[in-house]
Image (cartoon, rainbow, N blue to C red):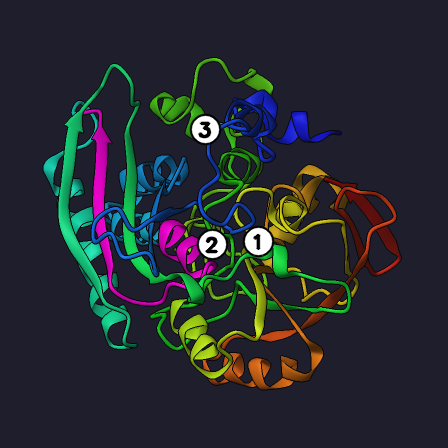
Amino acid sequence: MTESNIYLSRGVSSSKDEIHQAIQDVDQGLFPGAFCKILPDYLSGNPESCILMHADGAGTKSSLAYLYWKETGDLSVFKDIAVDSMVMNLDDLLCVGATNNFILSNTIGRNKFFIPGEVIQAVIEGYGDIVTKMKEYGINIHLSGGETADVGDLVRTIIVDSTMMTQLKRNQVISLDQIQPGDCILGFSSSGQAKWESKFNSGIGSNGLTAARHDCFNSEYGEKYPETFSGNIPQEMVYCGKGKIGDALANTPLTLGQAVLSPTRTYAPLIKMVLEAFANKIHGIIHCSGGGQTKCLKFGKGIHYVKDKLLPIPAIFQYISDTRNYSLTEMYPVFNMGHRLEMFVDQQYAESIIKIAKDCDIEAQIIGFCEKSNTQKNTLTIKHLSETIQYQG
């Protein structure tokens, strides 16, 4: 089974190759090697500063939140969807070195036939809750309002997107073209319960959710809630799992529904602490979002990434793999598989950074290293148990 069967046949792409091809001639900003596009500071005109702006959202995870709410009456899942939407922006901006004074705007598109005002209220409250929590850790996010549009012709249930903006001194920018052979790769767990989290996190994040939703849950949900999926998806790929949202997920305190809806972990407090302690020592930070463990292939120059000591695979990913008999080769480009943050540093700083992570109740370890690629392209080798998997950029 190939990725096209996991993902592309459902109208989604983890690699987004056609998107990257479409924008290949677009200006790449001041630091083309950075994780996010960086613009001159057009607002102040200061040549020593730059502007970062990023747009992203919770994706199709909101469809499962809708299904879960209809089944349980629990509106709080929409608060977590706001967290997903914000974190998918915030943590990308953190990867270029920004750690404070963010401005956030939200864009909500809803189908009013299915999404009442109480759902919108829960989403807005969710933004407020995560902003308040981050302020406790010295990360100030300013809410600038947003737009809620009734677009039932376009949206089947609800979509929750955000845009974030901040300023940064140019000499503080972390550009991934600084990654070099000899760097070690630090991986930071996506699961467990960080100090700023109120409950156990399955680690799933906000990527691969189209696949996870349909592969985990059984066909009765498709029959009951046809508004939660596209009619263009082949019928055999729609809610083709065995589970129900209330089923216990082994080796976790979560039900299957709670696990797939676990809010995307932000690493903001951790990254802020690391950058305060090791300014100019970090060669790169990658948020393993779209592309999962193969995300690194898009960054750096002529690097062979070797990941040979990965963190344990969380229960939710093992469940998806076992239920649908997906291979690791298929899973790694779609899901984070255990860590959604990577840092690239000289090994002398590794243990000190790992200690900061553990003080945040986040498991971390050296998960691999960088060496020169045998080709001009980036390459990736993942070793897990007895398997060796190779990918090329």
Tell me how far mark 3 sits from mark 1, CA to CA. 21 Å
Tag 1 and tag 2, C-beta contact below 8 Å: yes
Q: Say few, some or many: other residues with alpha carbon within 10 Å of mark 1 (under 14 / 14 to 19 / 20 or more).
A: many
Alpha carbon of mark 1 to alpha carbon of mark 2: how far?
7 Å
Question: Any magenta on residue 105?
Answer: yes
Q: Nearer the viewer, residue 282 or 187?
A: 282
Q: Inspect the image, locate mark 3, and give the three-letter code of the amino acid beneath it.
A: Glu
Residue identifier under label 2: 259
**Separation of marks 2 and 3 at Cα, in angstroms:** 19 Å
Question: From the image, which quarter does the C terminus lie in?
Answer: top right
Which residue sits at x=18%, y=41%? 119
Q: Which numbered marker is on residue 316?
A: 1
**Is residue 177 part of the magenta span, yes or no?**
no
Label 2's element?
Answer: helix
Percent of width and height locating residue 225 = 35, 26
The amino acid pointed to by label 2 is: Ala
Q: What are the residue bounds of the magenta stretch?
A: 87-111
Among numbered discs 3 and 1, the one appearing first in the sequence: 3
Circle 3 crowding by C-alpha within 10 Å: few under 14, some 14–19, many from 20: few
- Image coordinates for residue 165, horizontal then vertical, percent: 28, 51
Image height check: is 118 above or below 182? Answer: above
Tag 3 or tag 2, which sits nearer the N-term?
3
**At x 23% / y 30%, what residue is drawn?**
109
Find residue 220 and name its label. 3
Q: What residue type is disc 1 on? A: Ile
Res 13 → quadrant:
top right
Crowd tier of the residue under label 2, counting other residues whose Cα lies within 10 Å: few below 14, some 14–19, many 20 or above:
many
> Would you identify the image quadrant in which residue 186 lies?
bottom right
